[in-house]
Image: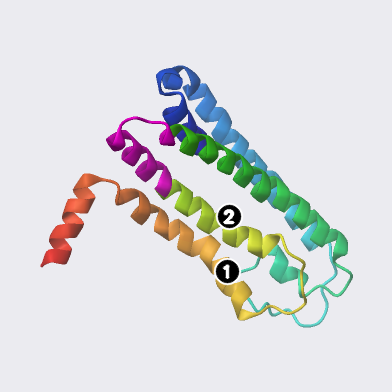
């Protein structure tokens, strides 16, 4: 999405030649493939650890950092694999997204039209909010040293990036729609 926004704002006359169907397919395929690759690596490293004794996870769902707390062996190599995959799936994309938005903001600031500037900021602002919420919480959960104790804050952070952010997506994106805004005003005015 950030690349699409970047092309739409920074290269509007070239949009249809740059954002072809094939480019969209490549971007989607790259996203799915990298996600599948990271999942396979994380799962492989996590499930090869020995687990003895208590098999109750103090967590809302079964994810690698929560499983590591149950392992009965040294988890250093698995933690490093999860960290490396975090770089691939979290830090690299968020870096590219932030560079895209830096370029977008630079372009928008130079726009002469106040209306065009407002439209660009509102379109990109909603995406940037979701990106910061999702990547911020996911980076906090996956890109820090593991401890053997799962606290309530860790559980809430994982719920935030796995449930809250996806639930906010339709709300954030639909509030840009004039019909939805009008319906919301009518409902709240009663």
Q: How is the image coloured?
A: rainbow
Q: Can residue 44 be spotted in the picture?
A: no
Where residue 79 appears, as percent x and y from the top left, is 80, 61
Secondary structure of the residue carrying tag 1 is helix
Residue at 60 percent of width and 46 percent of height:
94
Q: Can residue 63 be spotted in the picture?
A: yes
- Magenta span: predominant SS is helix
Q: Quadrant of residue 14?
A: top left
Highlighted range, magenta = 108-125
Q: Quadrant of residue 135?
A: bottom right
Which of the numbered marks, if any, corresponds to residue 82?
none
Where residue 120 appears, as percent x and y from the top left, is 37, 38
Which of the numbered marks, if any, corresponds to residue 157?
1
Nearest the eye: 97 or 104: 104
How many numbered marks appear? 2
Q: Is residue 13 magenta?
A: no
Secondary structure of the residue carrying tag 2 is helix
Where residue 105 appears, as percent x and y from the top left, is 47, 39
Nearest the eye: 85 or 130: 130
Crowd band around label 1 with a 10 angstrom C-alpha radius: few (<14), some (14–19), many (20+): some
Q: Quadrant of residue 138?
A: bottom right
- Compared with residue 146, is residue 29 higher up or lower down, i.e. above or below? above
Circle 2 is placed at which residue position? 135
Q: Are marks 1 and 2 in contact (CB under 8 Å)?
A: no
């Amino acid at each position: 999405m950030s690349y699409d926004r970047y092309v739409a704002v920074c290269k509007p006359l070239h949009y249809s030649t740059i954002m072809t169907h094939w480019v969209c397919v490549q971007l989607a395929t790259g996203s799915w493939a990298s996600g599948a690759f990271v999942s396979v690596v994380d799962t492989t490293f996590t499930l090869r650890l020995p687990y003895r004794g208590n098999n109750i996870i103090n967590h809302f769902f079964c994810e690698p950092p929560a499983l590591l707390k149950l392992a009965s062996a040294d988890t250093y190599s698995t933690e490093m694999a999860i960290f490396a995959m975090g770089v691939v799936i979290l830090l690299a994309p968020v870096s590219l997204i932030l560079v895209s938005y830096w370029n977008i903001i630079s372009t928008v600031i130079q726009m002469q039209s106040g209306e065009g500037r407002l439209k660009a900021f509102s379109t990109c602002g909603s995406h940037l909010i979701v990106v910061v919420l999702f990547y911020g919480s996911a980076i906090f959960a996956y890109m820090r040293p593991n401890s053997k104790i799962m606290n309530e804050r860790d559980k809430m952070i994982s719920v935030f990036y796995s449930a809250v952010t996806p639930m906010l997506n339709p709300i954030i994106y639909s509030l840009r729609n004039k019909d939805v805004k009008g319906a919301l005003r009518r409902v709240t005015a009663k």
